[in-house]
Image (spheres, rainbow, N blue to C red):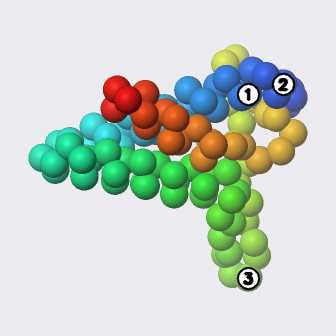
Amino acid sequence: MKFQQDENQYDEWQAYFSYELLRAIKERLEQAALPSQQVRELTTAIGFDLACLIDASAPFEVEGTTITPVLTFSAEPDLLLHQGAPSDLHEYVHGNADELFGE
């Protein structure tokens, strides 16, 4: 497995990934027949919390060891794309939520 650093491509893909994360959350909440305003608020809040976990903005501990997730993307076998630092998914949540909900 090879690693390639490409901040521009990574940034584009993480923006799409953030949108897809929100879309999946929204669809599941809509299935619960929640009011539309509550779906929007919960989609954004849950999406932001999950993005922070993935971004390493909220590291966690396992048996006393701090764990920091590092997100990579792959569009071809044996190649992982990274940006040289943890992801910034949480930066896209509010803008993507606005787009997802047509605002």
Q: Position of residue 76 (x, y in %)?
A: 70, 17
Ranked by sequence position, the earlier of labels 3 and 2 is 2
Q: Residue at x 66, y 70 (%)?
A: 60
Calculate the distance from the C-alpha at mark 2 to the C-alpha at mark 1. 6 Å
| Discs 1/3, front | 1
Q: Which mark is residue 75?
A: none
- Which residue position holds label 1? 10
Which residue, as the protein is rendered here, is positioned at the far left?
A: 33
Q: Residue at x 75, y 72 (%)?
A: 66
Calculate the distance from the C-alpha at mark 1 to the C-alpha at mark 3. 31 Å
Comparing 38 with 51, the one in front is 38
Q: Position of residue 42 (x, y in %)?
A: 34, 53
**Label 3 packing within 10 angstroms: few (<14), some (14-19), many (20+):** few
- Which residue position holds label 3? 64
What type is the residue that disc 1 sits on? Tyr
Q: Element at badge 3? A: loop
Q: Position of residue 94 (x, y in %)?
A: 50, 42
Q: Element at badge 2? A: loop
For residue 58, what is the image quadrant?
bottom right
